[in-house]
């Protein structure tokens, strides 16, 4: 490719929830596209960072970060900016899911899901946005929503998750418009059922029902999300902000 519009060379990307699953896999692809990687996770992801660095020849480092704590998030952004010299991209991916009916859900369970999936996404985007504006830099954010922000999954009951992901999609649009004149683009992806620890933990009976209703007749893999993330993070999508890309094996269209 002469005009390397998908290249992320020379950029530094923060990846939240990069210890495992979608974050871990997509971080590898972002590194393969040329970016250095700063992983923020509740768990120590130094082995993931070492593996990425060895495999793709980029700089990678992990930071223990609870995205629900805005002070810790701000400190991790400051530390990563100091360690890497700059920050340019954010893959805002950390999230959790809870299968529990709305009638039984305790207030602290509702708050936990909203805190990680919505508040956490906001706190990281805000700290990253503040860093960019303070340093007069352009930037680019991809938030991880879910097809559950568009449809209501069955048979499992997960109103807290669905509501949190619908909110992530609208937060994405709101930040995209607020930050147009700051040269910060904000988009989201909405994966369907993807094979990771979140889905592996789910009731096998549910999984059978999901497979029967996905037109592809299989779950997706984290690898199958990477191209969309690189597209949205790169100069291939400079006129795109506030968009949501659904990647779901046709689940939401039938
Ligand atoms: N797997 C799917 O089918 C699917 C579908 C749609 C959307 N998603 C979304 O994709 C994202 C990643 O999911 P996954 O399947 O890879 O899950 P996963 O459980 O495999 O990984 C989630 C990662 O987030 C981290 N994390 C959780 N809480 C955190 C916190 N408070 N602070 C920092 N890190 C935290 C975990 O330690 C873990 O490394 C989530 O936002 C999820 O909602 C997943």
Image (cartoon, grey):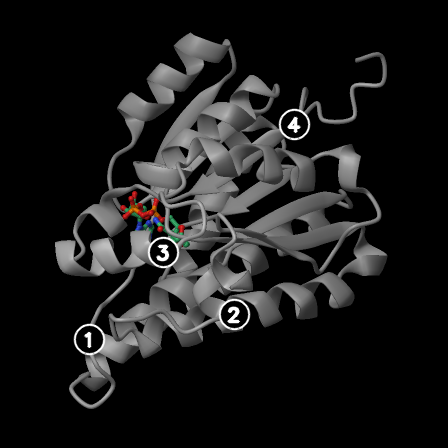
Q: Rounded to the nearest whole Å, what is the CA distance between mark 3 and mark 1?
A: 16 Å
**N-terminal label among 3 and 4:** 4
User: Residue 242 lies in what quarter of the image?
Assistant: bottom right
| Residue 12 coordinates in the image, percent (x, y) | 59, 30
Query: Circle 3 is placed at which residue position?
Result: 95
Q: Note whether ligand 1 is within 8 Å of mark 1.
A: no
Pick whichever of labels 3 and 2 is earlier in the sequence.
Answer: 3
For residue 11, the mark is 4
Mark 4–mark 2 distance (CA, rounded to whole Å): 32 Å
**Direction from residue 202 to residue 134 in the image, left or right:** right
Q: Relative to the observer, which residue lies in front, 195 or 69?
A: 195
Is ligand 1 within 8 Å of the beta carbon of the residue shown at mark 3? yes
Which image quadrant: the N terminus? top right
Give the number of the mark in front: 4 or 2: 2
Q: Position of residue 176 (x, y in %)?
A: 72, 61
Camera-nearest residue between 176 and 66: 176
Question: Marks 1 and 2: CB-CB under 8 Å?
Answer: no
In the image, which disc is placed on residue 100?
1
**Residue visible at 20% across and 46% down in the picture:** 200
Label 4: how many residues lie within 10 Å, few (<14), some (14-19) or many (20+)? many
Q: Which residue is painted at 16% across and 51% down in the image?
A: 201
Mark 1 or 2: the one toward you? 2
- For mark 2, what is the residue? 150
In the rendered image, the vertical position of residue 194 relative to residue 50, given as above or below:
below
Label 1: element kind: loop
């Amino acid at each position: 490719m002469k005009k390397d519009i998908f290249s992320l060379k020379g950029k530094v990307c923060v990846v939240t929830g990069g210890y495992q699953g979608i974050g871990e896999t997509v971080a590898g692809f972002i590194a393969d596209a040329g970016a250095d990687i700063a992983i923020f996770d509740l768990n120590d992801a130094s082995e993931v960072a070492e593996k990425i660095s060895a495999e793709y020849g980029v700089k990678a480092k992990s930071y223990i970060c609870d995205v629900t704590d805005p002070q810790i998030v701000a400190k991790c952004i400051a530390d990563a900016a100091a360690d890497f010299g700059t920050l340019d991209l954010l893959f805002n991916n950390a999230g959790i899911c809870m299968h529990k009916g709305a009638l039984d859900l305790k207030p602290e369970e509702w708050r936990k899901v909203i805190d990680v999936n919505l508040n956490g996404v906001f706190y990281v985007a805000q700290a990253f946005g503040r860093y960019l504006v303070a340093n007069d830099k352009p930037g680019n954010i991809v938030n991880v929503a879910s097809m559950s922000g568009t449809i209501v999954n069955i048979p499992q009951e997960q109103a807290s998750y669905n509501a949190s992901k619908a909110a992530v999609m609208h937060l994405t649009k709101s930040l995209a418009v607020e930050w147009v004149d700051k040269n910060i683009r904000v988009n989201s992806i909405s994966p369907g059922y993807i094979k990771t620890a979140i889905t592996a933990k789910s009731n096998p009976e549910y999984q059978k029902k999901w497979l029967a209703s996905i037109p592809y007749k299989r779950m997706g893999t984290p690898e199958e999300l990477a191209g969309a993330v690189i597209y949205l993070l790169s100069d291939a999508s400079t006129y795109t902000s506030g968009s949501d890309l659904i990647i779901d094996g046709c689940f939401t269209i039938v």
